[in-house]
């Protein structure tokens, strides 16, 4: 797969379509996982996102971006949404949406924060920032390109980390800030934010770094990647922040 988004997605990105909710899963604390059947769907490249638009009976609309978690070969588009306190769109998706509902969707979108399998990369996520990296991991495992992908996921606790089981099975490095956690080599990582040394070891030999999460998280990781010798022109960032 090309490292760039296909030209067709530039066309569909401007067109709204219908997404029927086929599965709803609220098993991760504070999150809802939605699996959508998107009409006139275009293939995505791992790392891309959709925009969902909610419409009230009085015509008021609100739209927000959500990264795609599914592999491009998955017949459904999977999103994982963190329910933010007083969040207009995320709390509706978390609390109200049910199987069979229809949402307005536009996508796939994004031509920069994409990974096509060929570039040795490290992906560093904070909380819901792990979602685009789950798509990359699923794609990598299906295509046998997983040697090119190192995923690092940080969260307060394991229960608050979406896809924790799948990440562990795939060998992702998990850094919890409020719980000790076993590492892939069998040792135990003491609860803490990511250390520069552990990021440096994981980033050894990569040609690109992807960072996704809150504004504070991406700034913190940008600093420690720099200390680890990853040049800023190798780093691609996606920030999940206030919509203003
Ligand atoms: C490219 C892209 C991809 C994204 N992918 C995902 C994803 O996969 N999963 C996901 O859960 N979110 C994702 N987001 C964030 C998402 O678009 C919304 O910003 C988020 O769901 C909040 O919207 P809301 O309407 O619920 O909150 P709002 O009503 O917009 O805000 C409610 C309150 O939360 C604050 N706030 C808003 N957004 C955030 C945030 N992200 N973190 C902390 N505080 C916030 C606001 O300042 C306000 O105080 C993505 C954003 C971008 C730009």
Image: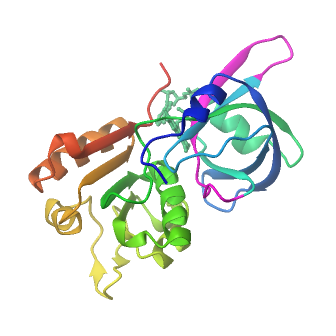
State the extent of the magenta-drawn residues as a range: 55-74
Q: Is residue 86 visible?
A: no
Residue at 58% x, 53% y: name it. Answer: 69
Q: Quadrant of residue 118?
A: bottom left
Q: Residue furthest bottom?
A: 186
Residue at 81% x, 19% y: name it. Answer: 56
How is the rendered protein coloured?
rainbow
Q: Main secondary structure of the magenta part?
A: loop
Above or below: residue 106 compared with residue 172 = above
Q: Residue furthest right?
A: 100
In the rendered structure, the answer to whether residue 238 lies left or right of residue 65 reads left
Q: Nearer the viewer, residue 33 or 113?
A: 113
Taking the magenta stretch, the answer to whether it contains residue 66 is yes
Above or below: residue 171 compared with residue 137 = below
Residue at 51% x, 51% y: name it. Answer: 46
Taking the magenta stretch, the answer to whether it contains residue 154 is no
């Amino acid at each position: 797969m090309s490292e760039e988004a296909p030209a067709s997605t530039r066309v569909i990105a401007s067109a709204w379509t219908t997404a029927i909710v086929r599965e709803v899963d609220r098993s991760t604390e504070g999150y809802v996982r939605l699996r959508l059947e998107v009409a006139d769907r275009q293939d995505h490249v791992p790392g891309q996102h959709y925009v969902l638009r909610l419409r009230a009976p009085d015509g008021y609309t609100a739209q927000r971006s959500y990264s795609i978690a599914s592999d491009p070969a998955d017949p459904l588009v999977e999103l994982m949404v963190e329910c933010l306190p007083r969040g207009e769109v995320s709390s509706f998706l978390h609390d109200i949406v049910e199987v069979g509902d229809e949402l307005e969707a536009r996508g796939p979108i994004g031509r920069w924060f994409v990974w096509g399998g060929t570039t040795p990369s490290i992906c560093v996520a904070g909380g819901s920032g792990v979602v685009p990296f789950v798509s990359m991991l699923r794609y990598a495992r299906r295509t046998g390109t997983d040697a090119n992908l190192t995923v690092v996921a940080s969260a307060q606790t394991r229960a608050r980390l979406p896809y924790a089981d799948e990440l562990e099975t795939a060998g992702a490095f998990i850094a919890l800030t409020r719980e000790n956690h076993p590492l892939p080599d069998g040792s135990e990582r003491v609860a803490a934010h990511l250390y520069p040394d552990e990021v440096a070891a994981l980033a050894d030999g990569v040609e690109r770094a992807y960072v996704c999460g809150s504004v504070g998280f991406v700034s913190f990781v940008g600093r420690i990647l720099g200390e680890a010798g990853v040049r800023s022109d190798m780093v691609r960032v996606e920030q999940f922040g206030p919509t203003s």
